């Protein structure tokens, strides 16, 4: 490996502190504000709104927890502070050699993707989303040069989503998080022109669009009867891999639906889904694109194949996979990012980060190592490398 290498970790998560929304929204809203309480049945602190339990509060805070998923810290006091406190996060990053971290939500992504919005009124839901986006900018204040905040959107109301893109871009967010499978959430397909105002807003603000894994419909993997039949360990393994392949379908949709051709300036990222499936998807998309004479039906593609659009506009990140030379060649050294998924159950931490950096990446020339570890991400998210 090249020595003294900078690392931008392109997928980490903030476990939202219990007072995130109660401290930012009017107290008159009462229990309709998302808050944390103890649940006797689950024997854990849970996020709730009204009488509805959303999720365990610390299920994603696995860094430093001594047992495998689905075991998780029951109380905030049992979770490592690096999962929810920025100063502790910086210390953990230093221990792992991470210079800059891209920040994704936990429960905020959950309610944005078909959880909290069900049954909630428009003003209340938008207020929660804005409060989260504002919170994240406050959270990074100990060292803003070392964090890349991403905003969540009320994507199911396109006018609200566009307005929030414009608002968060002005505030300093570096990208947006939304679903790559809107049709699974009762919304139009990605190819529908309904979404063009959102893509246009991202083009005009320069914010990349991030499709994080599990933004489809995870219920197919987490059905109680399957958990009872197979157990927690098998469910976790199957759900993780299945969710990665769901992102493969979303990327296939993205490459084929014309959005990339119509909005060539907009960048997209398939997050926490690995990269081993990319060469097959590109080969299959190109092959069938030509077989079907797709350009006749969709002249907006011009002479570009899906793989050309991918290499121009789409990024992927990896963490546990052994990086093979042929993968770098086919996926593209300019399209690969590195991640740890800190502090989630599948994350790298401590010596695992070093191990991952010597899991095939060391075979690459120094210039390729630099691209994968930081240059690509710095270009994508507009990182001030000198400050970082």
Image (cartoon, rainbow, N blue to C red):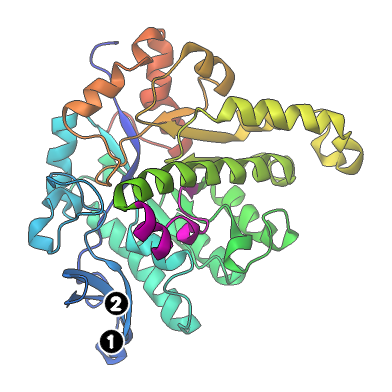
The residue identified by callout 1 is 31
Looking at the rendered image, the quarter that the N terminus falls into is top left
x%, y% of residue 72? 19, 55
Identify the residue at horizontal 58%, vertical 19% (top origin). 330
Position of 304 relative to 146 (above/below):
above
Q: Is residue 82 left or right of residue 364?
A: left
Query: For mark 2, what is the residue?
Result: 48
Q: Quadrant of residue 21?
A: bottom left
Viewer-nearest residue: 157 or 228:
228
Residue 159 lies, with reference to residue 193, above or below; the image says: below
Secondary structure, mark 2, is strand
Residue 82, percent across and down? 15, 48
Cβ–Cβ under 8 Å for marks 1 and 2: yes
Which of the marked residues, 1 or 2, is nearer the chain's N terminus?
Answer: 1
Residue 256 lies, with reference to residue 306, above or below; the image says below
Q: Which residues are magenta?
A: 211-230
**Residue drawn at (16%, 77%) of the image:** 40
């Amino acid at each position: 490996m090249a020595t003294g290498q900078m690392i931008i970790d392109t997928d980490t998560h903030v476990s939202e502190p219990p007072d995130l929304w109660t401290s930012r929204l009017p107290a008159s809203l009462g229990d309709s504000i998302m808050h944390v309480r103890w649940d006797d049945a689950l024997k854990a602190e849970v996020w709730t709104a009204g009488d509805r339990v959303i999720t365990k509060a610390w299920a994603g805070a696995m860094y430093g927890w001594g047992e495998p998923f689905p075991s998780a810290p029951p109380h905030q006091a049992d979770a490592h502070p690096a999962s929810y406190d920025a100063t502790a996060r910086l210390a953990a990053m230093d221990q792992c050699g991470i210079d800059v971290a891209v920040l994704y939500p936990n429960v905020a992504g959950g309610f944005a993707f078909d959880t909290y919005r069900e049954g909630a009124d428009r003003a209340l839901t938008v207020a929660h989303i804005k409060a989260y986006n504002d919170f994240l900018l406050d959270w990074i204040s100990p060292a803003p040069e070392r964090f890349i905040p991403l905003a969540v959107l009320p994507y199911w109301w396109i006018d609200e989503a566009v307005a929030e893109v414009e608002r968060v871009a002005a505030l300093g967010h570096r990208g947006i998080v939304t679903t790559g499978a809107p049709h699974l959430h009762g919304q139009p397909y990605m190819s529908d022109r309904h979404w063009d105002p959102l893509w246009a807003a991202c083009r005009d603000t320069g914010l990349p669009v991030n499709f994080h894994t599990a933004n489809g419909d995870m219920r197919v993997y987490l059905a109680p009867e399957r958990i009872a039949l197979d157990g927690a360990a098998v469910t976790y393994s199957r759900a993780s891999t299945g969710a990665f392949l769901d992102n493969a379908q979303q990327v296939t949709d993205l490459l084929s639906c014309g959005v990339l051709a119509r909005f060539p300036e907009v960048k997209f990222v398939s997050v926490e889904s690995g990269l081993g499936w990319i060469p097959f998807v590109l080969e299959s998309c190109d092959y069938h694109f030509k077989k079907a004479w797709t350009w006749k039906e969709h002249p907006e593609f011009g002479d570009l194949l899906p793989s050309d659009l991918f290499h121009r506009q789409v990024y992927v990140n990896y963490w546990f996979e052994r990086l093979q030379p042929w993968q770098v060649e086919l996926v593209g050294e300019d399209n690969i990012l590195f991640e740890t998924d800190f502090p989630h159950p599948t994350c790298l931490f401590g010596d695992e980060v070093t191990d991952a950096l010597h899991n095939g990446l060391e075979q690459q020339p120094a210039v390729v190592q630099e691209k994968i570890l930081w240059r690509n991400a710095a270009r994508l998210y507009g990182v001030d490398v000198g400050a970082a």
